[in-house]
Image (cartoon, rainbow, N blue to C red):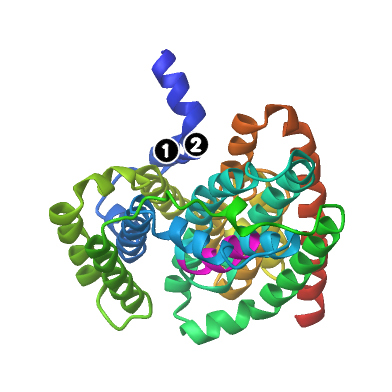
Amino acid sequence: MKLLKQFIQQETVLTAAAVLAVVSAFFVLPDAQYLGYIDLRTLAILFSLMTVMAGLRRQGFFDGLGRALLSRTHSTFQLTLVLVGLCFFGSMFITNDVSLLTFVPFTFVVLSRLGADVRRALLIPVVCMQTIAANLGSMLTPIGNPQNLYLYGKSGMSIGGFVLLMLPYTLVSLLLLLAWAARVCRKASDALSVDELVSSSASQGDQKIILLYLVLFAVCLLSVIRVLPYGIAFAAVLVCALFADPHTLRAVDYSLLLTFVAFFIFIGNLGRIPAFSGWLQEFLTGREVLVAVLASQVTSNVPAALLLSGFTAETQALIIGTNLGGLGTLIASMASLISYRQIARELPQGKKRYFGLFTLSNLIFLAILLGVWFLLR
């Protein structure tokens, strides 16, 4: 019982998705149509990308990139721009989760080398900015987060069309982050020593393994833009990881893959219940963006995308709504929990301050970006 309780606490979304799938199976008994629910393309590409990112992270590739950029910083403003920029631009290619898993702990290490006053002034605002930056930077590309990958595949859009759809919101987000960074850094000491920030003892990964993963990443991108069949990318990543770096396969987020499977079953079954599917389709019509934003606040944006996509053809509206919906509550984007847990572990006395700043800044960003959507629609 204790193990079950611990599992539910750690995998709340997966547990909820599994319960919904099982309950829906009582209304629509399992049959051959269940196989058609599963989007194998999304699952295969998601697994491939997660494996590649886990491998690069294990080899210290992103940590090395961060140190290289930090070696050119000479002020608190430049330092903040690098730390936030790593999450904002990095999330476009390595996902918001990986960005935060990599660069938030990295930020704690970097800021620990500064004076107490500067560290106190920067730490919580910078981590908060990084979290928002990762969630907003990731919305620009189909591979930035799981719901984008799924909705991009479902929409049939070109990658250029996807980027253009989200570009206005990304540019506004970047300007807001720059203004916020400038405001925060006015309160901190300006001059920094490069030697304070960059440690010469940083470990170097296996360059051959890093090169292999970079090649595999390119293969994954080709499958995302439909140049290569997704099966080729999946097979290439799986075989290379098994033989060259098998430990990386343990770092893949299999619970996310299982969550997708459970939601595919749940959504597929709901679609076969005429009364419910008809009501939800009618309710969604003309309100796709706002419903996606609101649903994300209580379910997070990945489940919201999976659920709502089964009942509307307005996939582009869902792309906007679920990406903007990652702002707001702490669970609106599950990636946000990564930063909160890091704060709770490393700076427990700062949890309340972080939560307050996080909530306020998220609501401000969400209100502004919804205003942009209102002007553009």
Report the amino acid beneath label 2.
Ala
Tell me the distance, in whole angstroms, between the alpha carbons under discs 2 and 1: 5 Å
Check the picture and name the quadrant holding the C terminus: bottom right
Nearest to the observer: residue 171 or residue 109: 109
The residue beneath circle 2 is 16
The answer to whether one can see residue 250 in this image is yes
Look at the magenta stretch and give its main secondary structure: helix
Residue at 46% across / 41% down in the picture?
A: 17
Number of numbered discs visible in the structure rendering: 2
Amino acid on which the number 1 mark rests in the picture: Ala
Q: Is residue 309 above or below residue 307?
A: below
Q: Which sits in the foreground, 54 or 308?
A: 54
Residue at position x 59%, y 30% from top?
345
- Horizontal and vertical percent position of residue 347: 67, 32
Q: Residue furthest left?
A: 243
Q: Secondary structure at mark 2?
A: helix
Q: Residues within 10 Å of mark 1 (few under 14, many from 20)?
A: many
Quadrant of image for the N terminus: top left
Check if mark 2's residue and mark 1's residue have beta carbons within 8 Å: yes
Left or right of 100? Residue 52 is: left
Between 226 and 357, the residue placed more toward the observer is 357
Task: Please name the residue that numbered disc 1 is placed on.
Answer: 18
Q: Residues within 10 Å of mark 2 (few under 14, many from 20)?
A: some
Is 205 situated above or below 169?
A: above
Point out residue 109 in the picture as x, y percentages from the top left corner. Answer: 57, 44
Secondary structure beneath label 1: helix
Is residue 91 in the magenta section?
Answer: yes
- In this picture, which residue range is highlighted in magenta? 84-93
In the picture, residue 183 is in which quadrant? bottom right
